[in-house]
Amino acid sequence: MNAASQGTATLLAQLRAIVGDAHVLCGDKPTRRFRKGYRFGDGPVLAVVRPGTLVEQWRVLQAVVAADAVVIMQAANTGLTGGSTPDGADYDRPVVIINTLRLTGIQLVNDGRQVVCLPGATLDRLEQLLAPLDREPHSVIGSSCIGASVLGGVCNNSGGALVRRGPAYTELALYAQVDAHGQLQLVNHLGIALGSAPEEILDRLQRGDYRAADIDNDSGRAATDPRYAEQVRQVDAPTPARFNADPARHYEAAGSAGKLAVFAVRLDTFAREQAEVFYIGSNTMDDLTAIRRHLLTAFERLPISGEYLHREAFDIGERYGKDTFLLIDRFGTARVPAAFALKSRIDGWFETLGLRGVTDRVIQAMMRLLPGHLPPRMKQFRDRYEHHLLLKVSAVDAAATETFLRAHFADGEGDFFACTADEGRKAFLHRFAVAGAAVRYREVHREAVQDIVALDVALRRDDRQWVEQLPAAIDAKLAGKLYYGHFFCHVFHQDYIVRKGEDPLAIEHAMWALLDARGAEYPAEHNVGHLYPAKPALAAFYQQLDPSNTFNPGIGQTPKTRHWNGCDCTGTGTGTGTG
């Protein structure tokens, strides 16, 4: 056995001693659902380790860092850009994924006005815990439905659909980082006094061994984005309201994208409001532009959410997102993570036989046998209108909103209706189901589809030409286009289904050039992952957090090598690259 093999064998033995044999996974089949991204990303790993306590996570980190291996921190693996999985096999060190889903735990502090979330805490569980208090987390129905973690949202500056709250953000976190000398350090900026030794801090936190007097509420550190509500109102600003590379929202764990090992974050919660939903349709973008600008500037309270759907996205979502819709509609969000995990395991088994997409084709065939699931009035608006807007407002603003909409459409060709509770719920559920529909379409139509180009775009707040007009040469290479998104934030998800034989990467780069010319930023809320190059400020932030390049190397197409291979992304050293 050579030295490298001896070293990996020693590391594996240490990991098994820390967490137990059952929680150290090796080999292609056992590690598949951890090393393969939800939409993108894959690569070999030495092991997937699943610690059961915060102290175990710390000890695992110590062992992996001491062995000079790569660390990829991962929770639910629901990201769309491959940011929590390996990217290929060209790392210069063995790769270890530390999956944190066993580290569940949510602690209410300050009478539920804030929460402390451990690495495996999911948005879905947080939503359930806060419901009896009539409070909500930062994000509701969306990534929560597929088991996304709270920490993942913070580390990726995830956006969400709620207009007033902005990207997930906090300045209160407990994390580990590796310094320039390769030493692992624990940093407690959680604002809770827990002792001084790392294992004491972590053990006390997991047990909730602290009192109200140990919580610092006067540090000046924010537990939510304090600026967004005002920024989104600035409808004439020539820049986007929120995007992933915005340095204003990079703070330690916030936006760290796996360049730190985060043990806990402290976040604000929000009072739940009674709300009303209006369903709006039009065939002109100017109609919806006028609604957006008025509701963002003329009302005392911002809308709760405003979700856009193009007719083609409506159609593809209705057909290829039907199972997701029905699963949540019948069983609630709590069952969805388990359903996704089961599907991943079955897919993995079929792939070992050389069969891809079997479950997708079987599920799709079953869905065709079931009756329609969308409310009749939604279907009527689908037939009449190209552009659809789902508008949710506070109940106290519902009458004024309806008065405005009646006046707005008095002479226009668009229309709206006030939803019943069931219609409003199903409208937003349909909008969510659209997000995964392109993936299903690809798997069912492999013979005609090369792949998907999925863009996550923040348009300028003053951009009135938000309906994209693609050049004919690009449009001819696409089998379908899905446009949907968070309309009031001017954040759009644009999924392009690429015809068989065409080059998705070339199409994506052509799309980037078009977006650059419009002054757009991308990605808006799903992080760069391994799909997008990190812009200089973002790459510099990554290098500042992780100077040894131990955590998640290659994120944002930065170097994968030790110590960034001489690349100085910060602009302060002698390196020759920009990351």
Image (cartoon, rainbow, N blue to C red):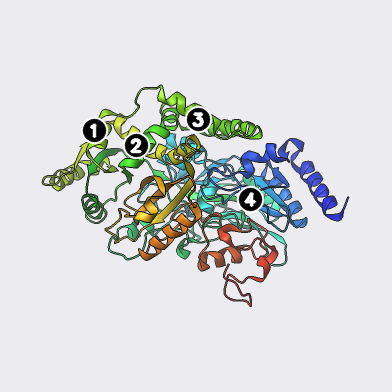
User: Is the residue under label 3 in contact with that under label 4 (CB below 8 Å)?
Assistant: no
Q: Position of residue 556 (x, y in %)?
A: 55, 59
* Earlier-in-chain disc, 2 versus 3: 2
- Between 371 and 11, the one nearer to me in the picture: 371
Which amino acid lies under the numbered mark 2 shown in the image of this protein? Asp
Q: Position of residue 395 (x, y in %)?
A: 26, 40
SS category of the residue bearing label 3: helix
Which amino acid lies under the numbered mark 3 shown in the image of this protein? Arg
Q: Position of residue 538 (x, y in %)?
A: 52, 64
Quarter of the figure with residue 420: top left
Residue lying at 57% horizontally and 70% vertically, measured from the top left: 578
What is the residue that sits farthest to the bottom in this orientation?
A: 574
- Between 493 and 305, the one nearer to me in the picture: 493
* Earlier-in-chain disc, 1 versus 2: 2
Whole-number angstrom distance, CA of label 3 to CA of label 1:
29 Å
What is the residue that sits farthest to the left in this orientation?
A: 411
SS category of the residue bearing label 2: helix
Q: In the displayed structure, does residue 177 sit left or right of residue 463? A: right
SS category of the residue bearing label 4: loop
Number of residues whose C-alpha sits closer than 10 Å to that of mark 3, classed few (under 14), some (14–19) or many (20 or more): some
Number of residues whose C-alpha sits closer than 10 Å to that of mark 2, classed few (under 14), some (14–19) or many (20 or more): some
Residue identifier under label 1: 380
Residue identifier under label 4: 86
Residue identifier under label 3: 361
Which amino acid lies under the numbered mark 4 shown in the image of this protein? Pro
Number of residues whose C-alpha sits closer than 10 Å to that of mark 1, classed few (under 14), some (14–19) or many (20 or more): few
Number of residues whose C-alpha sits closer than 10 Å to that of mark 4, classed few (under 14), some (14–19) or many (20 or more): many
Q: In the displayed structure, does residue 541 sit left or right of residue 25? A: left
Quarter of the figure with residue 107: top right
